[in-house]
Image: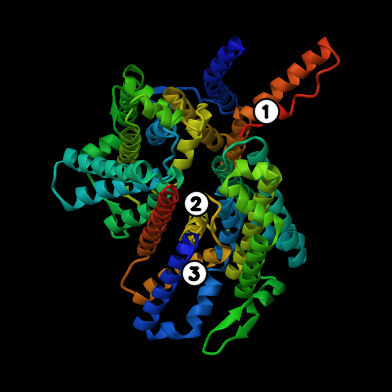
Amino acid sequence: MKKNNFLHKHQKTLAPLLSLVLIILITASVTPGFLSIRMVDGHLFGSLLDILHRATPTALVALGMAVVIGTRGIDLSVGAVIAISGAVTAVLTVNTDWPVWVVILCALGTGMLCGLWNGILVSVFNIQPIVATLILMVAGRGIAQMITEGQIVTFHSDVLDAIGNGYFLAFPIRVWIAIGMIALTVLVMRKTALGLFIEAVGANVRASRLVGIEARLLVLSAYVFSGLCAAMSGIILAADIRGADANNAGLWLELDAILAVVLAGASLAGGRIYLLLTIVGVLIIQTLTTAILTSGLPVQYNLVVKATIILAVLLVQSPKTRQWISDFFTKKKRAANSSTGKADTGKGSEKP
Amino acid sequence: MINERNLPILATLLVFIMLYGFGMYEYKGFRDTLVFSNLLTDNAFLIITAIGMTFVILSGGIDLSVGSMIAFIGVLMAYLISNTGMHPLFAIGIALVVGVAFGAIMGVIIAFFEIQAFIVTLAGMFLFRGLAYLINLDAVPIDHPFITGLYDIYVPLPGRGGLTFIAMAMLVLLALGILIARRTRFGMSVYALGGDSHSAALLGVPVKKTIIKIYALSGFYSAMSGVIFAIYTGSAYPLAAVGVELDAIAAVVIGGTLLTGGVGYVFGTFLGGMIQGIIQTLITFDGSLNSWWTKLAVGGLLLFFILLQKGIVYWVKKRSAA
């Protein structure tokens, strides 16, 4: 049984990576030149680079989402937070002559404030995370529209342009930002006790409290972190189009982020976080999207393909499916060993 | 004495009366029955969706696929009517069967694979929107004489108002929902499931069967809403009704249904939907406020009702402990 668990664990790590490689190979065989990367003016170009470039906003959001899901929560408001932080960036750049770093700090602060609001509702008022973050998801775009006064605010700033579309050491700057953020998060989550504590809270709140973990503060900080990540993503998205669109910025991004976390094999019931696999999940989604676009299939297949993949992954991940499969095999074995003992297959599996 | 379980719906009623009263006091035009009948017609599809959602939330689940379902059913209907020359009545029948079937499939996945309703219906949300895109990418008119005939049915009320077919269909579906919730064994099972699914199972409630029926019912109501929406707009558009799932959840919560399940009324959902409509109408009457105020007001009300629920649950627990 123990050996089996060990195998399962490795299966889990390998599955997303293999699927990513598989998707890239299939796309490469359908689309010629998909794998080619050129060097132009010291910048790398190519479809793969394009995937990295486009995946950064989702990757940042998914990073925060993974931490929140680890605490047995969910953050539906990230799309709205993206719109709000983008709006703050745009309006402050246009209406004040503050230095860019102050503007960026303000936008990040706004995101953290949104996260704090979610965190307070979840950890202090004990509201279910879906519902607590739903409030900001509904009202957030309204707030963003209030900030931009209902208009698409366009701005110009060299630093923000660089964040959106600039290059550094052959790679897009935004990819470097994402890599830095991911490295930092992995470091903090894996090299300090914080990651363990957060997973402990997600696995069992009461038990972790009994061991002396300040559960409330941890949950609160998870949401603040998610808000920070969403704000970063919002700044990048606003910088990319040099404007803030309160209605459409980050629309449906929360779904892609949740999907990436689930693809990485994390349970929505909390307790286990796979940060790097989540990024692989993001890349899978972005590769699929790009593959569908470049292969000449109509765009509308995108959603159906995505939905089918989520459902397939969910069904495979479900403990019930695994149990049925293992039941099936043990039944076979038992049938081979002795002809009796068919009775106890169904009942034992029902958990309260 | 007032039962504390009824407190949320009383609060809903109070908010409804206060908002409506404010409108009547402030604007002369608001006093006409026209405003009320327009509220019924304009919010019909939202309220119908929210009735299905009420059952889901009462059982402790959630259904995020309803908005996409509305768009999908509308596009499917338009395709059947214009491309196959089918009579609209058959098309509506097929669309409803498809809606119920998809709802039931989601229910099966939730019940038998024990995956959270939230993520299953999220996948459904993608899938239905995608299917709608596959059938048609553009907005297409539905101008069959039968459909326009339905749209034109009108029963005048005193004043300038009147009941449209859409409003009447909504009221019939509302009555049906109340009957199902209050007068059938299935309705009792839904409440029991939301209260405590483990005890419900011990009491002999067929848990899995009930869950499948709940999502099939939600599929039926959102498909019905899709039909009504198609009649209301006279067109089908794959991007229609984006975000309606959130409005529907908000209507249910503002209508006093406890989000943890087990407590609530279908009629409250009707009031919750109407309150959202009134807020929108008030903002239109004011003229100087922008449409985003609706989102803020609905978000604020949502927060208020969730905190109210929390307060009541806390108070009841404290009292029963003492």
Q: Is residue B70 left or right of residue A341?
A: left
Looking at the rendered structure, the secondary structure element under dot 3 is: helix
- The answer for how far apart the CA atoms under marks 3 and 2 are is 19 Å
Along the line of sight, the residue nearer the viewer: A97 or B215: B215
Q: Is residue B239 above or below residue A190?
A: below
Question: Same subunit under labels 3 and 1?
Answer: no
Q: Which mark is residue A349?
A: 1
Say if residue B136 shows up in the picture: no
Mark 3 belongs to which amino acid? Answer: Met
What is the three-letter code of the residue carrying label 2?
Leu
From the image, tell me which residue sits under label 2: B259
- The residue identified by callout 3 is B274
Q: Residues within 10 Å of mark 3 (few under 14, many from 20)?
A: many
Q: Residues within 10 Å of mark 2 (few under 14, many from 20)?
A: many
| Residue A167: x %, y % from top left | 30, 29
- Who's the residue at 41% across and 32% down the image? A71
Residue nearest the viewer, comparing A95 with A275: A275
Task: Point out residue A256 in the picture as x, y percentages from the top left corner.
Answer: 48, 38
